[in-house]
Each structure stands twice: as structure tokens, then as C-alpha cells.
Amino acid sequence: MQNTVACYKWVADEADIRVHPDLSVDLSRAAGRISEYDKHAIELAVQLAGNSGGQAVGLTFGAEPVRKSLKDALSRGLDEALWIKAPEQATVDAVVTARALAAGVKSLDGVGVIVCAEGSGDSYARQTAPRLAALLGLPVVTSVCEATFVDGVLRATRRLEDSLETVAVALPVVVAVLPQINRPAIPGLKAVMAAGRKPVTEKTAEELGVDLAPKSEITSMKGFAQARKNVLVESVADLVAALKKEGIV
Amino acid sequence: MTGIFVYSDQVSLACELAGFGKSAGAETHVVTTDEAAATELKSCGADVVHVLRGGDNPPPEAFAGAIAELLKGAAAELFLVGATVRGRELAASVAGLLDWGMASDVSGLSYSGGTLAIERLVYGGAVVQRETLPAPAVATVPAGLCEPANGSATVEIADVVPDSRVQVVGTEPIVRQGTSLAEAERIVSVGMGFNQREDLSLAEDLAAALGAEVGCSRGVAEEREWLPADRYIGISGLSVKPQLYLAVGLSGQVQHVVGIRETKVVVAVNKDEKAPIFKVCDYGIVGDLYTVLPQLTQAFN
Ligand SMILES: Cc1cc2nc3c(=O)[nH]c(=O)nc-3n(C[C@H](O)[C@H](O)[C@H](O)COP(=O)(O)OP(=O)(O)OC[C@H]3O[C@@H](n4cnc5c(N)ncnc54)[C@H](O)[C@@H]3O)c2cc1C
């Protein structure tokens, strides 16, 4: 029996980000959601735990708004959730996140596989899994597009730039998965109802002794400006004429 | 602290990073786990090439612990790593082992007075974020940002014990059909606006008339599986830089269009005049692809 952990992040929905004409960025109206990539991590953790008769635990780190994610996460098949609470004012980076997640994993028993997504929907820094593994003293496998485990050994296929590499590693292990790994099911009504009754543990970062001092500082955020002509043409003939003028055709 | 250390599993990228170290005026060290690459790495601006060897031909990631030791022992100020799949894992492992800050996939970087200043894209490419990190720090850097330099380095070989916990049991090349999209001059890109797989022939006909390759959005490749995964463009897929990018039945969400920024001319065909693609295109036609595409194909034939 192996328990699994799925790490997930509550992120601002980038579709709601407003970029003003002066390129300043307004995140205040962005609704939160579980990072899309992390839904794949949750799905894999649930599947691997199911295959070995273990429990799948959702692990997340963040301030109060993260509370809204718990039911959604649990409706995706996780057995329980562990929320490491960060103070509202904390500005964290990947260093702090990995410390908090590592403390969370250490508080759990019998963990065989810790699944992260390759990156998060907001920052996509792809640091969390290797950092977490380093802090836990575990091996890591990133860029995973296929994973199974048999007899305490995880076999994973990694997508490199121009090849697929298959690796074998004894548990426990940290993996970072690509979206190709699976197709997360949309939770049904029954799963959503059941989620409300599943156990959630809340611990503060302070309680777990997590050092909240980040190493990097964000100095500015600006909307990305793409200078395009934005000309709407009336007909195919007009389009062809415009492309000829550009010297493209 | 002394010295900028660089690593990439791609020799040309390692040379670019060594060039950055030299231009920053620092003592520059190139780390490699491939003894054969040392000859080339010796002459691209670094002062020292460190060859780490050991084990039975392990992957570079297995040297993360040994590299962390090397950086610590030398009191390195920066560790710059080529942003490849292997490089990213190795870099973040080293950062984790040393408890250093790290900036991933930077789109710009500078280093002075012990501070690394970087720029990178976040929120699917909608936002450019600037960050500062005090040395020592790690960054992953894609190809093309830094210039290689000239020089002659001394080579130091060290026998180390790589991590043997992750064993490579097989590798299989990814076979790509057609010209790689990354190099294509013209791309016709299809989105979820196509009703059924057979209808992609409309795009293929247009592509043939234009001498273009066919690309797509993620949904077309991953949800519908109409095209292989190496054909989709965007933050989780490919970045392309054609002369002409013709987006058909594709809404133009930021995660997709971040991959077409280097395009010369973007054209959109979409039946919804409010589709975001019209804000990031040069020329747009509001119309049904099922009528517009055949007309376009005819015009170019
Ligand atoms: C974390 C994350 C990462 C992502 N990474 C990527 C990525 O790398 N690449 C990527 O592509 N996407 C990515 N996505 C998904 C992305 O957000 C969009 O959902 C996706 O690009 C939309 O694909 P689409 O434009 O084909 O489909 P849709 O958004 O469904 O758009 C279809 C368009 O077709 C138009 N249309 C319909 N019928 C017709 C017709 N008959 N004639 C003309 N027009 C018609 C519609 O008006 C609509 O605009 C990512 C999403 C997330 C959350």
C-alpha cells in the first residue's frame, strides 16, 4: 500500500487579468481556481493510490482564499486534504513554497509518490518538484507524460526535447507531470457532495516552523504589449491584397 | 563570492552562458558531465571547464548533488543553466539543495553588484514580471539571449559519485512528420472551430496552396487528438516564428498566442468578431471558416 500526495496551487484565472492601456496589470478582479495543470497531478495521485489501496492526499499552501479550493480538490477523488496556511501578507517564491510543502509531506505517513504538475498556471517556473525532492532527500522525475508503479518501483516516461526517456525509480519519489499524462474527469454531483464530508487538516506555516523569507523579489509587473495592426478586412480579395503588399505572398 | 558557473546539456547554449559570464566581468566556470564536450567548451570565453565524471553513463540530472557541492566549495555567485528539460530539473534540484533563489526561463537578465535582475513571462504570457535576486542564485536561460565569446580555459577533471536512484531504462526518439513547425515560414493553424476531423482538409488544402505547415491549438491536439502533440503552439507547446501565421477557428487565448509573438504577420479567420484573436492579429476576417477557407485556397492556387 502506498499513499500518494498531490500538490496543487490556487491561482488567479489569467482570463480575468486586466491590462490597462498604460500596461499596468490589475489582478483584483481575477477569480481564483485550482491551476489547470494541477488537476492532472491530482488525477494521477488518485489513480496511483487507488491502484495500490492507499490514500491520496491533496496538499496546498496559501492564504485564506485557498479555502475555496478544498472542496473542488476533494471532489476530484482525493481522500483528504492538508492545507498549510500562509499569512495573508506573505510574499512567497518557489523557495518558500517548497519549504512549506516539504513540511506538509513530512507530517504525513507512508507516502510513496508525491505528484506535482510540471509548473503552475500563473508562474510556470517548474521549480517546485525538484526543490521539494531536494528538501525531502528524495529522487525526482520531471516532465513525465506516463507513469505506473509496480512492486514499489515507479516507471515513468519523460518527454525531452527530441526523445522519450523511460526511467525506473524506487519509491518514495517526487514526480512532475505534463498535461498529456491523463484527462482529469469532471467531478459528478455525487463526488461534489461527498467532498464536503472528507477530512481537511489545516496547519499554519508557523506551526510547522516554515521559514517564510523569500529569496527573490518581484520589482514590477507589466502587461505584455504586442504591436499588431488589427485591421479587419471585408473580403478574401482584400486580405490577399494586404498580404501581397506586406510581401508575404 | 567568486565566479559565475554555467551548465547546459547543449554545448552551444553552454557557450552562450559562458559568454554572459565573461561579459559580466566575472571569473567564468563551465560545468560539464560530458568529457568529450570539454574541447569545444574550452574556447568559448570561460576561464575553467570542470568535467564531472562517474557512474555508468548516467543522465546529467544525476550530477545535481555533485554540482551543488562544487558550487558551494567554490563560493559561486551565480549558476546559469540552459533552459532545456534536463537543465531545468538539474537547476532547480541544485537550487533546492543549496537553498538558493532561482529565476526560471528568463527572457532577459543582467548581473551587477551582487544582484541578478531578470525578466520573465507569467500568467500564460500575459504579463512580463521583473525580479531581483541577491547572489548566490540560479537562473535557467533559453538559447539566443547571450552571446558566446572567445578564450581559452583550463580543464579540471573530477571523479564524483552521481545519484543512481533514477535509472534510465529506455529511450526512444520522437519522430516528427513534416517540417518542424519551429522553422516553418508559413503556418495555417487550426482551432476548435472545426466541427469534425475530416474538415481539417480545408486547412490542409489552404496549407498546400500556400506551401505552409499545419499547426493547431492545444485542444485540437490533446482533447480531440486530431493532430500530434508536437503540432500545437503556445505556452505548453511550441513557439513559432513564421512570416505568416493564419489562425482559423482559433479564439486566441493568451496561452496560445504567446507562442506566435515572433511571427511577422498574423491573420485570423473567426466567426466571432469579439474573439480575442482579433486583438493580436494584423489582418482579420470575421466570417465562417467553411466559406472563407475555400475562397482563400482558390485565391492562392
Ligand atoms: C495552464 C494552461 C496552459 C495552456 N496552454 C496552451 C497552449 O500551449 N496552447 C494552446 O493552444 N492552448 C493552451 N491552453 C488552452 C487555452 O487557454 C485555450 O483554451 C485554447 O488555446 C483554445 O483553443 P481554441 O482557440 O482552438 O478553441 P476555442 O477557444 O474553443 O475557440 C474556438 C474558436 O473558433 C471560432 N469558431 C467556431 N466555429 C467557427 C467557424 N465555423 N468559423 C470560424 N470560426 C469559428 C469560435 O468563435 C472560437 O473563437 C492552456 C490553458 C491553460 C489553462
Image: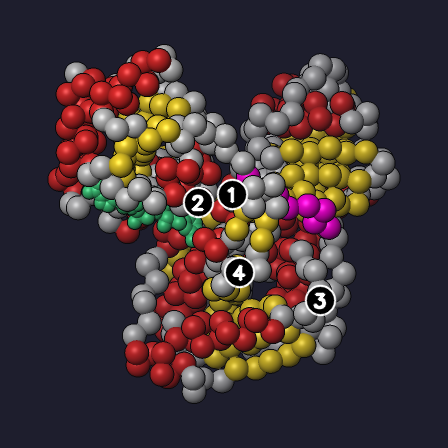
- Within 10 Å of disc 1 (Cα), the crowding (few <14, some 14-19, many 20+) is many
Separation of residues labelled 2 and 3 (CA atoms): 29 Å
Residue bearing the label numbered 2? B255
Most frequent secondary structure within the magenta stretch? strand
Viewer-nearest residue: B69 or A97: A97
* In the depicted structure, whether residue A214 falls above or below residue B204: below
Question: Mark 2: which secondary structure?
Answer: helix
Separation of residues labelled 1 and 3 (CA atoms): 25 Å
Check chain identity for marks 4 and 1: say if they share one: no
Residue bounds of the magenta highlight: A217-224
Residue bearing the label numbered 1? B125
Q: Which of marks 4 and 3 is nearer the N terminus?
A: 4
Occupied quadrant, residue A103: bottom right
Label 2, ligand 1: CB separation under 8 Å:
yes
Is residue A182 among the parts visible in the rendering?
A: yes
Is residue A106 among the parts visible in the rendering?
A: no
Give, as a three-letter code, the residue at label 4.
Answer: Arg
Viewer-nearest residue: B21 or B114: B114
Question: Mark 4: which secondary structure?
Answer: loop
Q: Residue at x 13, y 40 (%)?
A: B198
Occupied quadrant, residue B246: top left
Query: Quick check: marks 4 and 1 in contact, CB under 8 Å?
Result: no
| Mark linked to residue A29 | 4
